[in-house]
Structure formats: structure tokens, C-alpha cells
Image: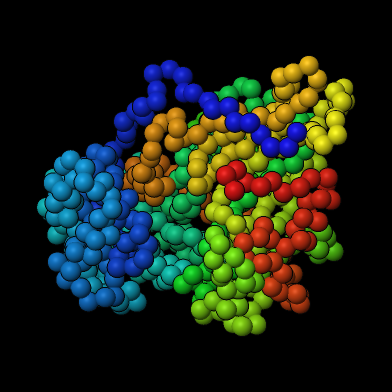
Amino acid sequence: MTGTIAIPLQVTGEGPVLPGRLRRADPCIVVIFGANGDLSHRKLIPALFQLAIDGAIPDDFAIIGVDRDALDDATFKAGMRSAAAGVAAGSSGRDEIWARFEARLSYLHGNLDDTATYAALQQRLVAVDATLKQVDGHLFHLALPPSLYGPVIQHLSASGVLPRTVEASQRPWSRVIIEKPFGHDLGSARALNAVARAAMGEHQIFRIDHYLGKETVQNMLVLRFANSIFEPIWNRHHIHHVQITAAEDLGVEHRGVYYEEAGVVRDMFQNHLLQLLTLTAMEPPTAFRADAVRDEKVKVLHAIRPIASEDMHVSAVRGQYGAGMIGGAPVSGYREEPHVSPESNTPTYAAIRFMVDNWRWQGVPFFLRSGKRMPARSTEIAIEFRRPPHLMFPIGQGQSFETNVLVIRIQPSEGVALCFEVKMPGVDMRMASVNMDFDYHDAFGASTHDAYETLLLDCMTGEATLFTRSDEAEAAWETLDPLLAHWESSMPQHFPNYAAGSWGPAVADELIARVGARWRRPAGT
């Protein structure tokens, strides 16, 4: 039977109230480079303020914004007040918490290629340190264009603002947050890692990928390794294939310049999608510790079978959206977007089949796809199980048999669903597919917490489990570099090849059909 019937799941125990936060940030000073930029306004300041509301920020805490814009403290604070206006709006005590938070904000104007800026920052850190009873460390967030990561790290090190520490437990600590992308290819990733390692220890580097701060992504570890019903069947004997989808209904918006250089593979696969693949495929770590978890993720990346040049056409497809309809409204094609060449061959869609050559996953294809201007925004991991070896029940006219699927929904609605077959009521033997559905919102109530809150708090406590290690970043590029080189040396002649509002080019359907499967339509779309 086509379609599914939803069976909601309940939270057992004393839920559905989430427990309070168990951690507080170390007393520290956060320095945001690019503090007047988009990321700071949209994500960083709102996340830090929400942590303050939650009681996760100690009294001994301060934020120093650094940027090239000539602002004074009052103007900077006003901008940050506007950025945080939607956080806990109207809640009791919110204004008092903001007043204390704002008092700890200050701004430093300077050019990031000028040594005088770092000398001034050193003086400011000393001055702010003196106003606090205790300071355990300094956290430097590089909310900057990737081309500036290396030079800023070198300046921080040369000026003495960023001292190298021997081990993670050392106090005071110094840590640096690097935003994605971690390089443009394998060579640039290695160069950036070399600069970072020359300035500091690996334990001081926090490469941030906001996908790993999402509840359902973190729940992958709990789902797999805290539930004995899943691990025995999480292998080639029971799983036919895995689909990982990251669909976006938006186009490139104002990011045309960036996207022309990056394309969908650098923008989504090297970080987000390969991270989801490693969490799905990794072996059980010996403990829930940063290096134990990251060791297993790196093993998966090294086990991914290289795609031979002669197999590129059957292992990966690319696409670019043309004009179409989104939500009933007409939208332009990629080549008509601002700052995009009218003859651009940049892919906005890709679907890639990866094979993981190890004992657990031999012969199980992992299909990863991501695209812009698709019908809806949705990210999910779908584990499709094998069909029963023999189906004794008759399939009537107009009926179909659906295989069991475990779906981990990451956005926009976070949850887990298991699809299985049941007998429909009646005298005839008729089957129907039903979904046993767990939804975070229904189980625990609405959550206003952003992934950056989790990740920033981790940075301020030194918890590195959800962050990318240098060898992991390089291994991801090693996986994708041959494909990128192949595509960049053989320009497509058929772009655009899918309409905005569709699920991608027809060749993507052919890619997955080769193993007798079809793309899932993500839940809620």
C-alpha cells in the first residue's frame, strides 16, 4: 500500500520536561574577529546571549569585538542589542540579563593585517582581565572570510596574544574557532592546518560545523550506541543502502560571489554531508571522548573507496537549477542570480554514491545528495533495510510492498521515524506501511536553541567531540578532490538541467536506480 500511517511515540519516564543545563562556560573572554559581520549578528551574539539567559555564562565573562569598521563601544553595543532582539523577547528578567551582558561588550577597531591591531588587542585583554575576578582562558572566533584565517592566526601567534599550550587541561587556555570551509581543496587545507599547527596545539583548534550542533545529529550517537535493538542490524547483512539528503528551497541569495568559487560539493559535501556519513557508518568508540569519537570518524573517511576517473559518470552527477516555481511563485535560474556569470557551469546540485570498504559496510552504497532551489528545505538520513528473503504474503492489484526504513530527520523538524509493514484490519490479507514517529517538538516541547549555542559552550568548556580534527578535514578533501578535479576539467554542456522547485536532474534518478532503489521524498514535503 502506498503512503504511510503515523503512530506517534511518547517519551517514557518523568518527561517530557528537559533537564536544566549541566554545564557552565569557563570564566573567559571571547574575542570575535569580524564582530560587525553577518555571522556575528545572525548567530554568535544571539547564541551567547541565549546561553547567558540559560545561566550557562558565568559572571566573569566578556566579549571583545574586533573589526575594520570605525565604531565606538556605544554603536557596537547598539548593533548587538538589535542582533539579539529576538532572543527570549518579552520573557521575565530578560532586560536585566541583557543589561549585564551588554556591560561586558566592547569593541576594538583595527585592520587585521596590521600588527598594531594585535598589540592593541593584547592591551585590551589585559585591561578586561583586570576587571574580572577570574579568567580561565581566551577564545578567539574567526568569523572572517577563509582567506584571512591563516594570516590572523599568524598575527595572533607572533604578537603573543595566542600562546601555545602543552595540553588541553592547562590554565589559562587559549583556543581558536575556525569556521568552514576548511580550505578550498586538499592542498589549501593542508596549508591552513600547517599554519594552525605552527601556532598552537591541535587541542587549541576548534573547527566548527554547525550541523554537528543540531540535536538529531548528536542523537545519532545515542540512537546507535545506547540502544541494543539497532547495533546488531547496522551492517551489510541487513541494510540495503543509505540515503543522506540536504535539500534547500533557497537559491544562492546574496552569496553569488562565494558560490561561484565553491559550488555545492565544497559548500555542502566536504563538511556537512561527509560528517553525517561518518556518524552513520562509524564503529562504536571506546568512550564518549573527543579523540575516541574522531578516531572512528577518520577511519570511515579512509575506508571510502576512491572513485576512479572511468567510474565518475556512474558514481556522481551534477546539476544546476534553471527558472521554475517555489511555493507557487516564479523564481529565476542560477545564471540569472546576482554576481553569477550568465554562462556559469557551477553545480548547484550533486548526487554522489560512496562505497565504504570495510567489514561492516562492504557492498552497501551511501547515496549523498544536496541541491538548491528544491521543493522544500529538508535534511535527513534514511537507512533502507533489505527486503525479506521470501515474501509469503500476496501483493494485490494496486498494492506495493515497502521496505523498512529508519529515518533520522535533522531539519526542519527534528525526529526519528521507523517505517514498517502491518496487516490492515479486515478479512483480507492486506498490508500497509506505518510510521512509528518520534518528534523532538512533540516530546520535549518547542526549543528555541540554535546549534551554535551547543558548539560555543563546548568551545568555552574545552569539549572537542563535535569539532573537526585536522586529519579529518584533510581526509574529507582526499575523498572529494578527484571528483572536483574531474568536473572542473570537463565542463558540462547541458546546464541548467533541472527546474527550480523540482527534486533535481533526471540523471540523479538513474544513479540510484542502478541498485534497484529510488530517492525518498523527505518527510513533510
Callout count: 0
Q: Which of 391 and 124 is in front in this view?
A: 391
* Residue at the limit of the structure toward the bottom, as seen here: 342
| Residue 194 in view | no
- Is residue 28 shown left or right of residue 499? left
| Residue 7 in view | yes
Residue 134 on image: x %, y %: 18, 45
* Residue at the limit of the structure toward the front, as seen here: 427
Q: Which of 243 and 402 is in front in this view?
A: 402
Residue 226 picture quarter: top right
Residue 258 on image: x %, y %: 51, 72
**Picture colour scheme:** rainbow
Query: Which residue does the image show at 39% across and 47% down from the upper left?
Result: 450
- Is residue 112 shown left or right of residue 271? left
Residue 388 picture quarter: top right
Residue 179 on image: x %, y %: 44, 59
* Figure check: 467 above or below 400: below
- Split into 4 quadrants, where in the image is the N terminus? top right
Q: Which of 447 and 53 is in front in this view?
A: 447
Query: Which residue does the image show at 29% across and 75% down from the upper left?
Result: 68
Query: Which residue does the image show at 43% across and 59% down from the upper left?
Result: 178
Query: Which residue does the image show at 15% across and 48% down from the upper left?
Result: 95
Residue 253 on image: x %, y %: 49, 70
- Is residue 463 shown left or right of residue 506? left
